[in-house]
Amino acid sequence: MDLTDLLFEIYPYAKSLHIMAVISWMAGLFYLPRLFVYHVEQAQKVPDSLPIFVMMEEKLLRIIMRPAMIVSWLAGGIMVLTPGIVDWSSLWPWSKGLSVLGMTWFQHWLLARHKEFAAGENTRTGRRYRMMNEVPTLLMVVIVISVIFKF
């Protein structure tokens, strides 16, 4: 069995794993900015809650979001390498790819904000985090439209 045969053989498994990982990753990308909003707006009102928020954010990033992002990239890479799956002369793989890079950037932005919270150095408002919460939604729309319509 050569590499091409192997890629075709594992393609449905890679695609299934990719979809599951993306769902998990997106859940984290949607939830973490909301946690930041609560961290900014509610933590001061509830005594001793700051370490709880930091711990929740850390676990979401480390246990769910990071592994889901890595599996999304790996499974997506397998699909991209499978011959005949991607028409590189079309616009859709490039718009999807740029959007995935945007999501990856957003996760790193969230990680940097978490580190600021953990160090007690957050300077952003709940409103800012609410606005940033729209970033993964916009990227998701581009990705889904790109993959479904294959323009």
Image (cartoon, rainbow, N blue to C red):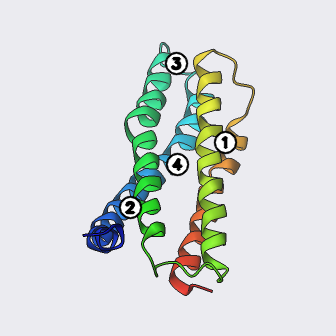
Instruction: Name the mark nearer the viewer: 3 or 4.
Output: 4
Q: How many residues crowd mark 3 within 10 Å: few (<14), some (14–19), many (20+)?
A: some
SS assignment at label 1 = helix
Residue 33 in the image: x percent, y percent?
58, 42
Residue 121 in the image: x percent, y percent?
70, 18
Question: Which residue is denoted by mark 4 in the rendering?
Answer: 29
Instruction: Name the mark nearer the viewer: 4 or 1.
Output: 4
Callouts 2 and 1 close, C-beta under 8 Å: no
Quadrant location of the N terminus in the rendered image: bottom left
Q: Earlier in the sequence, mark 2 or mark 1?
A: 2
- What label sits on residue 50 in the rendered view? 3
Residue 4 in the image: x percent, y percent?
36, 72
| Amino acid under disc 1 | Tyr
Question: Which residue is denoted by mark 2 in the rendering?
Answer: 18
SS assignment at label 2 = helix
| Amino acid under disc 3 | Leu
Q: Is residue 101 above or below residue 87?
A: above
Nearest to the observer: residue 42 or residue 98: 98
Identify the residue at image location x=62%, y=15%.
119
Estimate the spatial distance between the alpha carbons at disc 2 and disc 1, rounded to whole Å.
28 Å
